[in-house]
Image: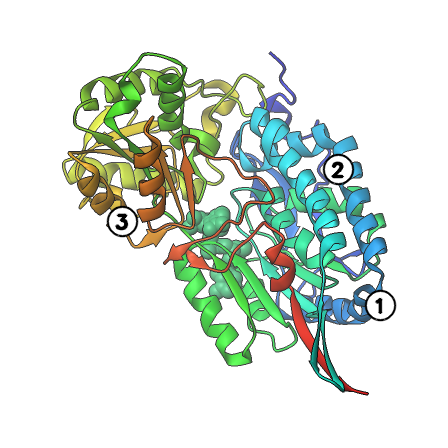
Amino acid sequence: MAVFAAPNTDGAVVDYESRYDHYIGGEYVAPAGGQYFENPTPVTGRTFTEIARGTAADIEKALDAAEGAAPAWGRTSVEERSGVLLKIADRMEQNLERIAVAEAWENGKAVRETLAADIPLAIDHFRYFAGALRGQEGGISQIDEHTVAYHFHEPLGVVGQIIPWNFPILMAVWKLAPALAAGNAVVLKPAEQTPASIHLLMSIIGDLIPPGVVNIVNGFGVEAGKPLASSNRVRKVAFTGETTTGRLILQYASENIIPVTVELGGKSPNIFFDDVAAQNDAFYDKAQEGFALFALNQGEVCTCPSRALIQSGIYDRFLGDGVERVKKIKQGNPLDTETQVGAQASNDQLEKILSYIDIGKQEGAKVLTGGGKADLGGDLAGGYYVQPTVFEGDNKMRVFQEEIFGPVVSVAKFDDYADALKIANDTLYGLGAGVWSRDGNTAYRAGRDIQAGRVWVNNYHAYPAHAAFGGYKASGIGRENHKMMLDHYQQTKNLLVSY
Ligand code: NAD
């Protein structure tokens, strides 16, 4: 067991600054309004850093810096930009433990996940787009004997990016890597709950990027996010967050007629067909693990498998085994490498999850395990911990229909394939889904018939950089990951040349 930072140290052992200004034009800049706000660590609930409170004036300053830097960055060679991305990846790898520990401290997530998944995935993302950029091609077509059409990719210019708190580094990198590869300058607003991790990252990689190409403005949604998303100086807005906020982002973008990607909420079904339990073997065990993954990242994942649908023939056995597995999940200090489930990212999120647990109980869902706040005692007593919770109920209930964004799964029974697909698709959302079956035909059909942008078949929660990710329905517009993102951060110029 390794514990990276004792919770009673108030963050002194992790290398966060006690105060973070904005990062604009390659320098730290105090907020125009002179205001700061305090951020607690979810591990203990105690304040550990102060953050500049951004306003429209700070956004304007960042846009000035980005507009100044964008033309030269956009004209750099493909080799040069690709090389910068590779150097960023190497620098992150050299500092992996430092970044991973800091993010666990700020967000409350388990350090074993940040070490093994979040930060390595972010590093790979930079490498992937460094390579994808080298492979990008334009096109030439002969129109007639004297005319040729040339297609070029041009950067958009300055783009605005707004991200949530559930994967502070990974969400930033999913947006930064393709935007930078494509030759854009960026103004990014992190979530108000988790800006420190990104500032730590910039202190590690900032010198590799020309000043003004990446600018970070902290602050709250309406005060700092809205001026960025509604600015007529940005050529695209990329947003990840709640569906309600996504609607506002789309409205702002419509005023400026700019492209926008909105990666929004989910209520993902995880479907287990009868044949999963044909044998008590490694496949069954993997499916059981897939069931328990609703608690990964404390359930604060947009694709959290928050609705488990289990076929009637295996229902009692599979659910019984699943509940026993959930009871064994190790919850504790996020900085302990044996901890599987840490703290929720904020007190507001803790309260929201607990209120949904009450709603589930009131509407008649049965609690099979969990069902309340986890009191871990000692220094963790003030932290934001929720017990992994399994509800059994009906897909009409609010705990099946609304995004809770916590370690809570709602389980329902289905009879046959048609029943499973009807329940799975009976949701506002369409982000992720899981299908578990030993029968290739059933698995493939379900993968095809589920209305979701990402369907995991006989696995769950893998996010390779080259697999397109995004939502159907109210889960969003656009995609992330995959080389297609380069197109999303560029515009196509056509030269029609006669000779
Ligand atoms: P949120 O919508 O409350 O906030 C997201 C960001 O938007 C924050 O930086 C916030 O400050 C900013 N914001 C808020 N109001 C704004 C406004 N009026 N104008 C501009 N910016 C504004 O979401 P959250 O609570 O931070 O994140 C959780 C949500 O994110 C969940 O719904 C989750 O499913 C979703 N999410 C989706 C994906 C995906 O890829 N689809 C990934 C991660 C999280």
Q: Residue at x 71, y 45 (%)?
A: 126
Mark 3 C-beta closer than 8 Å to ligand 1: no
Q: CA distance from mark 1 to mark 2?
A: 25 Å
Identify the residue position indicated by label 1 in the image.
72
Label 3: element kind? helix
Q: Are marks 1 and 2 in contact (CB under 8 Å)?
A: no
Q: Pick whichever of labels 3 and 1 is earlier in the sequence.
A: 1
Q: Nearer the viewer, mark 3 or mark 1?
A: 3
Query: Between 242 and 478, which is closer to the camera in this rendering?
Result: 478
Identify the residue position indicated by label 2 in the image.
92
Identify the residue position indicated by label 3 in the image.
425
Q: What type is the residue that disc 1 sits on?
A: Ala
Question: Does residue 399 appear to the left or right of 239 in the view shown?
Answer: left
Q: What type is the residue that disc 3 sits on?
A: Asn
Query: Dividing the picture into quarters, in which one does residue 300 lie?
Result: top left
Query: Between 111 and 250, which is closer to the camera in this rendering?
Result: 250
Q: Position of residue 412 (x, y in %)?
A: 20, 34
Residue 371, compared with residue 133, is above or below; it is above
Q: What type is the residue that disc 2 sits on?
A: Met
